[in-house]
Structures are given as C-alpha cells and as structure tokens.
C-alpha cells in the first residue's frame, strides 16, 4: 500500500544504530504505508541489519558509527541521486508510530517547501521530566536564533524537502545535527511546521538511547553559541526560498536622521505599523538602560526572540545616545533619591561618586525609559500607519508578484558567507595592510578550531605527521596549520590588492630551471597543496615562457579572488581537466611548443581515473600519474617545485627534485609507480621541513570501500 | 599495407591492447569512450604513435580533435598530411 500520488518522490529513511530489537518491526510498519524505504545502518555492531532479511528495502551501511546526522546526510544524497524530492525520517527505536506517516505525506503535499517536524503530545503520556525540560530548552534556542517557533524541535520524526541538503552545508554530524538543520533551514527561508503525532515511550529497560550525556551536551553548547552569535550578525543568510521577511538587507538606507524615510523602508518589508512601533519602543527602552556597550547586543537578542524588526529597534535606540539621555536619566534618578536636581558637575560628583550616578542612571532609566519608549512607539505608529495607508494600494499589486517568485524557488548564490568573510579581510588589507589582516586571523582561526568538524579535517594529516601528540598539542598544531593557511590566503590577496612588490620571493634552482628549459622539450612543474603557488609563480617570470595550469575552476573557488583583486587578467592559461579527453591533448600541445605545464601531484582531480596507489607518510594514498605519462610521451623533464613562507613578507621557491621519465613505458599505472613514489618522497621531505605548510584538510588515506550501498533483497 | 591497416596494427602493438585483433577494430568505431575504450592518457600515446610510425606531428590540437574520432578520421588526417 503506497502513499497517494507523490509517493515515488518521497523516501522514508530509518537511520539505525544498534536497535536490532525494534528495527524490523519499525521497518515493517513503514512498509505498510510506503514502498520506498531506505535503512541507513550507522555502523551498528549488534547485527540489526541482518534482521531485515527478506524485506523489500534498500540498505546503506556506514563502516563505523558516524552519527545520526551523517546517516541522514547519506540518505539525502541517496534520495537526490534517485531524483527524489522529500525525505521522511523515522527513528528505529520504536518511539514513533509508522501509522503517523500519512500525516507527513499530507504535509508534504500541502507545504512542499516546509520542513515538518512531528510534535509528540506529552500531555497524554508519562514522559520523563528531563525530556520535557530538554524540549523546552531546545525550543527556546531555536526561537532565539531564528524567531521560528516549533512545539517539538527535538523530535526525529520529520519530513525534509531534499533541496536543503543540496544547498546548505552543515557542521555537525551527530545528534545536534537535528538542531542545526532546523536553524539553517529557517535562515534559508524555509517554513518550519508542526505535525501532530502520537508518542510511545517503551518502559525504561526496553529503550536504548545513544545520547552521551556530557560530550553531546558540550557539542550542543558549542553549536548553540555559534548559531546564536551568527544569528545576531546582521549579515543576510543564504536564502534557498525567498520569503518577504528579510529586514536585514537594507540596513544602509535606514537612519534616525531620516525617520520617515526609514519607516517607509521598513514598512515595505512587511512589518506592520504595530510591530514596528513595538520594536522602536523596545529599542528606546533598552537603549535608556545603563547597559554599557551592550545595548545593541541586548536589543538584537530581545528582537530575535520576539521576532521584532531588529533594524527598527537598533535605529531607534540611537535616540538614547549619550550624553543627553544618560544625563537626563541621572538627573531624574538623582531627583528621585535626593528630592533635588544635580547641579554640581565636578570630579567629586561624576568621578568619585560614579557608582551612585550609575545607580541613579538605572533608577532614572526605569522611570524615563518606559515613558520615552511609549512616546517613540506612538510617534512611529502614527507615522507608519499613515505611510502604510498611502502606499497600501501599490503594495497589494506587488505582493502577487512576490508570491509568484517564491513559488518559482529563486535560488541565490551559494557563497554569501564565504564572500563576506573574504571581504572583511580585503577591507583589513586596504585599511591596515597585511599585519592588520593577520591580526584578524588569530581570533578567527581560534574560533573556527572550536568546531570539532574543522579540527577533524586538520587531523587527517597532522596525526600522521605528529603521531604521538596529546590533546593540546593536536589543538596547537591544528591552530598553526590553519593560521599558516590563513596567512597564505592573506598574502595572496595582499599581492592582488597592493601589488607583487609586497612579497619577496627567493628562488633556489634558477640555473637548473634555465638549463632544463633550454632542452626545448617543455617543462612539467609538479606542485602540491603547499605554500602559495600564486605568490611563488611571480618568481618564475624570468623564464619568459608561457605557463599553463591544469586546474578545475569552480564557481566559488578561492583562487579566483587572487586575480580578480589584482584587477589583472589571469597570467596563466588554464587547462580544464573536465574538457575533451581530460585536457590531455592540450597538455601535449603546450609541451610540444616548449611551454611550461604546471599540475598538482598530490591530489586526484575531478573524475580522473589515472591514479596509482603509493606509499605516503605510513599509509597508502592515490596520486595521479598523468604528469609522468606526459613526460614519458613528450620527453619533457619534470621538476618538483615547492614554495613556502619564511617570514611575514617573504617566500622561498625551491626546486626540490628533477624527475626524468624514459620514453616508451607503455600503458598501465604500475610502470609509473617509481616516479610517483619519487614525488611522494619529495613531499614527505617537504613536510619534514615545513610541517604546517602542507595544507591538507582531507583524508587522502581514506579507505575507498567506505559508504557502500547494497540491497537486501533486490 | 594501407594507412588504415597499419594504424590498427600499431594501435594494438603500442597501446598493448590485449585480446584485440586488427580485424576486430571497425573503421568507424569510436577510439575513446564506448568504442575501443581508450582513455585520455592513451590520447597522449596516440600523438606519439602517429609521429613515430607515420612521421606526422600533431601540433595543433584544434586539428587533432576531429582526427581522433575513429580509425577512419585518423587515417584520413594522416593521408592528408602526407600528401
């Protein structure tokens, strides 16, 4: 029995980790309502997947436990690959009733762009108090961060539109993923909806939970801190679905100096006169309090929580700017305490008695604050009501257009986040040069390293380079590597913005390079993700030979910024490996012309299948051998050329090794292994000398048997 | 021996195509992808083979690309260049 109409587009996913006892029953229950069912076994060790024998479901297995979030992400990928549009997740521990599934299917049909979350009605059941509290707590954070309200933000019974997995990136992969996905979806413009479901909590010993108290709570705290901080930054979130709710985008045009124009602006953003007035009042009320430098923060929090217009509140709080309002408050407070106004302004009264004045400021604010807040709110309301009457007619016609646009799901640029981060570094460079941008790096890198996912990325390589490090050393090493990468990125932008003379590059091996070029068989530079090749390349100008780079250009590729900011045409010709025959013919062509070809030797590009397994840092990795094949075919010598940063504004570029590959080696990958190994050894030498300048943030040693998909029955 | 026949022979020899006889390669079979199943690095080798056995140097890949479609097109290209 399948769900009506849209059934084929919907995947029901059962993520499971060690719930062998209940799994089969749950899956059978789901199958009664739907026939496209995927079980994601997240590294169970109790053989639960075997209990599915004979059921018509698909099975995806993680080789080890990666977390519920990872399981959902795998399922989403699986569904997207098969052209599905929605995914309903149901827990494997039996706490959800599969008979509620039709309610989710109905919700999907009615609100295809909403994320629906099952709401367990706790009133009917005997629910542990801790669950109840946890739910309230997590609902509170969700509302603080997004302004969206859900009755049960912790429930795992949900219907996801798969488009969010196409367009959003997530940091967490365990339980807190379920929180993160809600927050990011709400920011992206999706509606969060409640779907009422029944609840069944098996008695104590029957229920197995994998929520590991302390660590999971700690992760949750980190996530919440980050999301909350992000939520008060008035930078727009990447929107998947355009909703006419975004008050942040027009910050620039608002100002207390032009109150009427500002109100008109804000009204266009679908705030009602009432809500605008409340927001302005809150701004003034909080602005009058002696919160000392924390006004804006407090206002943003309060507005986030009550979903008030942040811009209106912050703007109106500017009315309380010192010295007038604080002085007035102090006078009022002083009057309340002493029955007279403070007339003597001296070091005595303002300096030594500062604590008294602060107290009076507080007292005065309590009296004046509500009064002035009321007055401002009234004024804003009256003006707003008038303006909105005037513009009412025009607005009505344009709102039709808006909903039409929303329906067409206008996708916006993916890289807003990355772009504003880049921009702030560019700004620092323009304002204060490289040092200023470096200074910004230290806290930013530290902040990012608080995220476990970022640390994990650093440790793939660092754990091999420094195998016996304790927790602090690991953190320190990750910090150094990420910081060095940050500095290189800054230098790259520095050269782009302020010119190549900003950085000195010393070249070792110039004579050898010239001698090799004189052979006129072309020259292959094999690079790696070390140092900064863009900066280093500027030292190669003496060769007076065109340089060609084998490089995949991505839409939001960070390399692009380098040239774009220099305002110069890219000085290299780029050969795209996704072109005809992987760019092979173009590469032969440039070598035949005696030009320089630069390729990355440490990583496979795109869907290049020409890799060979080689020993590297105590493990086996796959490295490309195309460069050696090209050398064999054309007789071009290979040069391993690495750059590294040696000081704030200096780099060195060193010819590490020349590799000669004889002609006529023929087909197959094995014949090139010795030369790939030569390169790998050279890279090992580099890592020994400059451990923090091999910018490797992915697991090149990863076992490829990972994430296999198999079918139970079919 | 015609250019086509020679081409098939050297293709098999120099690319070490095991279990393939010259007769099995059809004149209009695609060299890359589905047909003969050569890959991008074989293309590199092919440039070398053509130069070694026929003395024709493919320098400009704008020309090379249409020539690399099948044995027919490649043989035609070589004959043109030799003429």
Image: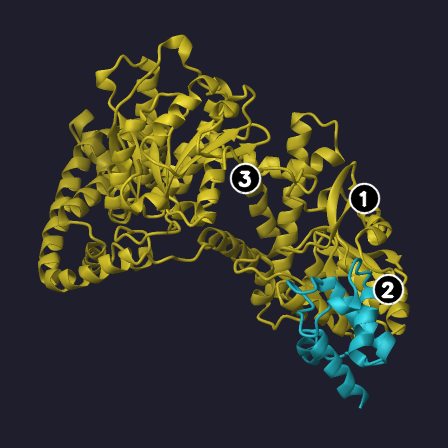
Chain colours: A yellow, B cyan
Mark 2 and mark 1 lie on one chain; the one further toward the N terminus is 2
Asked whether disc 2 touches disc 1, contact meaning CB atoms under 8 Å apart, the reply is: no
Percent position of residue A352, x then y: 37, 28
Residue occupying image coordinates x 26% and y 35%:
A102
Report the mark closest to the observer, 1 or 3.
1
Q: Secondary structure at mark 2?
A: loop
Q: Which residue was labeled with disc 1?
A: A684
Left or right: A603, with A329 as reference point:
right
Report the mark closest to the observer, 2 or 1.
2
* Image vertical order of residue A692 relative to residue A466, above or below: below
Q: Quadrant of residue A520?
A: bottom right
Work out whether residue A195 or residue B41 is closer to the camera in this orientation and state it: B41
The CA span between labels 1 and 3 is 27 Å
Asked whether disc 1 touches disc 3, contact meaning CB atoms under 8 Å apart, the reply is: no
The CA span between labels 2 and 1 is 21 Å
Residue occupying image coordinates x 22% and y 36%:
A329
Q: Which residue was labeled with disc 3?
A: A448
Q: Which residue was labeled with disc 2?
A: A637
Specify few, some or many for label 2: CA neighbours under 10 Å numbering under 14, 14-19, or 20 or more: many
Left or right: B11, with A518 as reference point:
left
* Image vertical order of residue A611 relative to residue A369, above or below: below
Query: Hey, which residue is sitting farthest front in the picture?
Result: B23
Work out whether residue A15 or residue A558 is closer to the camera in this orientation and state it: A15
């Amino acid at each position: 029995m399948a769900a009506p109409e849209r059934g084929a587009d919907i995947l029901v996913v059962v993520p499971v980790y060690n719930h062998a006892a209940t799994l089969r029953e749950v899956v059978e229950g789901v199958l009664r309502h739907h026939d496209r069912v995927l079980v994601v076994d997240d590294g169970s060790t109790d053989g639960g997947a075997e209990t599915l024998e004979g059921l018509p479901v698909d099975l995806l297995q993680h080789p080890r436990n990666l977390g519920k979030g990872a399981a959902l992400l795998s399922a989403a990928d699986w569904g997207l690959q098969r052209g599905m549009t929605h995914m309903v997740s149901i827990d494997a521990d039996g706490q959800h009733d599969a008979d509620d599934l039709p309610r989710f299917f109905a919700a999907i049909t009615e609100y295809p762009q909403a994320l629906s979350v099952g709401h367990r009605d706790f009133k009917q059941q005997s629910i542990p108090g801790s669950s109840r509290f946890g739910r309230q707590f997590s609902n509170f954070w969700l509302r603080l961060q997004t302004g969206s309200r859900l009755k049960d933000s912790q429930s795992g019974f949900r219907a996801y539109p798969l488009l969010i997995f196409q367009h959003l990136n997530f940091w967490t992969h365990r339980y807190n993923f379920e929180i993160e996905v809600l927050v990011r979806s709400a920011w992206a413009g999706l509606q969060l909806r409640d779907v009422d479901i029944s609840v069944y909590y098996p008695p104590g010993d029957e229920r197995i939970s994998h929520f590991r108290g302390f660590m999971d709570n700690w992760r949750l705290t980190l996530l919440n801190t980050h999301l909350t901080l992000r939520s008060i930054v008035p930078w727009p979130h990447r929107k998947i679905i355009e909703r006419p709710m975004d008050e942040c985008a027009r910050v620039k045009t608002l100002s207390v100096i032009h109150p009427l124009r500002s109100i008109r602006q804000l009204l266009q953003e679908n705030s009602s006169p009432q809500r605008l007035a409340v927001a302005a009042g809150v701004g003034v009320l909080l602005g009058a309090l002696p919160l000392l430098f924390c006004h804006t923060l407090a206002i943003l929090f309060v507005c986030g929580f009550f979903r008030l217009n942040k811009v209106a509140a912050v703007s109106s709080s500017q009315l309380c700017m010192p010295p007038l309002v604080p002085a007035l408050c102090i006078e009022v407070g002083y009057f309340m305490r002493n029955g007279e106004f403070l007339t003597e302004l001296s070091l005595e009264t303002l300096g030594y008695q500062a604590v008294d004045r602060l107290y009076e400021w507080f007292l005065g604010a309590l009296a004046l604050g509500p009064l002035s807040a009321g007055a401002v709110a009234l004024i804003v309301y009256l003006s707003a009501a008038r303006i909105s009457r005037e513009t009412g007619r025009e607005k009505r016609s344009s709102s039709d257009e808006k909903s039409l646009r929303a329906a067409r799901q206008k996708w916006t640029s993916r890289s807003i986040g990355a772009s504003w981060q880049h921009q702030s570094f560019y700004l620092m460079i323009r304002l204060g040069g490289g040092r200023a941008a470096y200074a910004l790096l230290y806290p930013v890198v530290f902040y990012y390293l608080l995220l476990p996912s970022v640390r994990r990325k650093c440790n793939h390589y660092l754990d091999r380079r420094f195998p016996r490090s304790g927790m602090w050393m690991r953190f320190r090493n990750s910090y150094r590597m990420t910081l060095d990468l940050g500095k290189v990125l800054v230098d790259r932008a520095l050269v782009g913005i302020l010119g190549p003379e900003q950085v000195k590059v010393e070249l070792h091996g110039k004579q050898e390079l010239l001698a090799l070029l004189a052979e006129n068989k072309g020259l292959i530079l094999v690079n790696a993700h070390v140092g900064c090749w863009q900066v280093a390349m500027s030292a190669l100008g003496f060769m007076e030979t065109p340089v060609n780079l084998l490089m995949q250009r991505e839409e939001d590729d960070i390399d692009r910024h380098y040239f774009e900011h220099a305002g110069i045409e890219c000085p290299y010709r780029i050969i795209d490996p996704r072109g005809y025959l992987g760019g092979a013919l173009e590469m032969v062509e440039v070598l035949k012309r005696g030009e320089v070809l630069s390729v990355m030797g440490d990583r496979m590009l795109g869907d290049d299948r020409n890799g060979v397994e080689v020993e590297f840092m105590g493990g086996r990795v796959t490295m490309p051998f195309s460069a050696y094949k090209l050398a064999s075919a054309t007789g071009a010598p290979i040069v391993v050329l690495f750059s590294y940063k040696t000081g704030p504004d200096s780099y060195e570029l060193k010819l590490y090794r020349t590799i000669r590959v004889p002609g006529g080696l023929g087909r197959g990958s094995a014949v090139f292994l010795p030369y790939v190994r030569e390169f790998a050894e050279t890279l090992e030498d580099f890592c020994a000398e400059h451990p923090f300048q091999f910018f490797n943030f992915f697991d090149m040693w990863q076992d490829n048997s990972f994430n296999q998909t198999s079918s139970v029955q079919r | 021996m015609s250019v086509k026949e020679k081409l098939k022979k050297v293709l098999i020899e120099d690319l070490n195509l095991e279990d393939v006889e010259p007769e099995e390669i059809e004149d209009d079979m695609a060299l890359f992808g589905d047909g003969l199943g050569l890959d991008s690095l074989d293309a590199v080798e092919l440039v070398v083979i053509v130069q070694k056995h026929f003395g024709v140097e493919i320098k400009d890949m704008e020309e090379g690309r249409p020539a690399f479609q099948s044995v027919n097109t490649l043989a035609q290209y070589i004959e043109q260049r030799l003429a």
